[in-house]
Amino acid sequence: MKNPIYSVVIPAFNEQEVIEETYKRLSAVMKGMDEPYELLFVNDGSRDKTAEIIAGFCANDESVRLVNFSRNFGHMPAISAGMEYARGEAVFIIDADLQDPPEIFPQMAEKWREGFHVIYGQREKRVGETIFKKLTAKIFYRFIRKMTSVDMPVDTGEFRLIDRKVCDAVNRLPEKNRYIRGLVSWVGFRQTAIMYVRQERFAGTTKYPLRKMIAFAMDAVTAFSYKPLKLATTLGFFISIASFIYLAVIFFQRFFTETTITGWASTVAIILLTQGIVMMILGLMGEYIGRIYEEMKDRPAYIVQEIIGGEDK
C-alpha cells in the first residue's frame, strides 16, 4: 500500500455495538474522496470484542490498521498514539461512536487544500442529549476558555483535520499528560472551523460521564494555565486582610469599650470557612505537583501490544 494522503485516527474503547457501522461509514466517505487513505483504529484496551472485529477489517481491507494497547490508557493517549502512527499528509481525528459525522470530511479536506492547517468541527447543536448534559458541556467549554492561557475555541472536541506539520509539531511536545485540543491550539498555524450538528450515539454508552468531565476539566486547566494558583494567592491575601481587620475590632472592643465579646459560633464558622479554603488551595497545589510528579517519572503515555494491518500485516 502506498503512502496515504489521508489518515483517519479512530480511538475505540468497548465499542463493539457501533464499530462495524463506524467502519462502513468511514470507508464510504473516504472512498468517495478518491485519494489514498488509511483507517487507523486505536484499541484502548477494550474488554469486549472491539479488537477482534477491527482485526477482521484488517484481514479484508489493506487500508485498515489496528494499534492495540496493552491495557486501557485513556482517550488522550489513544489519540496521541494515532497521531504518532498516522502516515497521511492530513490526519482526521474522530471518535468511534459516530456522534461526529464523517460525512463532513470532504469539507474539511477542501479547507485543507485552501491552505488551512487545522480544521476543527464546531458544534452548533447537540442532538439526543439531556438538558443537564448540554448545560454542563456549555459551561465546561467556556470555563476552559476563560481559565486557560491558550485561545481554545468553544464547543469543539478532538473532531478535526490536522496537517502533517501540525501533527509532527504536537508529536514532538514532551509532556505525557496530554490535552490534545489544547496542544493543537497552542502550536498555532492557520486554523478555521466548520459548523456541524452533533448526533446522538449510534449505540453503546458514553465514555465521558460527569466524573470524567470534571477530571478532564482539571487536566485542561492545570496543563495550560496558572490562573488557579494566582486566584488562590489573591484569595489568601484578601482573607488575611479581613482576618487582621476582624482581629483589630476584637482588640478594640476588649480594651476600649464595654461591649461583651460574643459570637463564638460565628467565630468557629469563620475558622471552618478559612480552613476549608486553605484545604482547597492545598488540593489545587497538589494537582499541579501531581502533574510534575507524573512528568518526572517519564513513563510512556501508553504501551502498544501489537500493530495489525498495513505494512505490519
Image (tube, grey):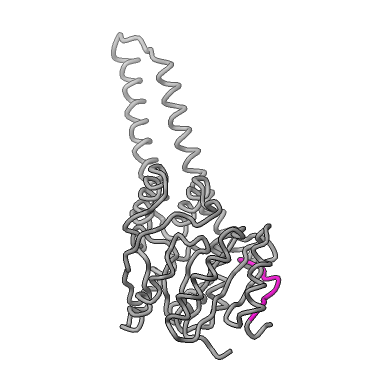
User: In the rendered image of this protein, does residue 286 appear above or below residue 246?
Assistant: below
Which residue is pictured at 55% across the width and 70% down the height?
23
Of 213 and 94, nearer the camera is: 94
Q: Residue furthest bottom?
A: 2
Q: Residue 306 lies in magenta, yes or no?
A: yes
Span highlighted in magenta in the image: 301-309
Residue 169 visible to the viewer: no
Q: Main secondary structure of the magenta part?
A: strand
Q: How many dots with numbers?
A: 0
Which residue is pictured at 38% across the width and 53% down the height?
127
Horizontal placement of 79 versus 58: left or right? Answer: left
Horizontal placement of 220 versus 149: left or right? Answer: right
State the image coordinates of residue 83 (x, y, percent, origin top left): 53, 74
Horizontal placement of 27 versus 15: left or right? Answer: left
State the image coordinates of residue 19 (x, y, percent, origin top left): 57, 64
Which residue is pictured at 36% across the width and 63% down the height?
150
Residue 194 visible to the viewer: yes
User: In the rendered image of this protein, does residue 47 appear above or below residue 232?
Assistant: below
Horizontal placement of 161 versus 81: left or right? Answer: left
Tell me which corner region of the image, top left, top right, bottom left or bottom right, holds residue 194: bottom left
State the image coordinates of residue 56 (x, y, percent, origin top left): 66, 72
State the image coordinates of residue 252 (x, y, percent, origin top left): 31, 19
Q: Quadrant of the C terminus?
A: bottom right
Of 145 and 304, nearer the camera is: 304
Q: Residue 87 lies in magenta, yes or no?
A: no
Q: Quadrant of the N terminus?
A: bottom right
Q: Residue furthest left?
A: 257
Of 5 and 147, nearer the camera is: 5
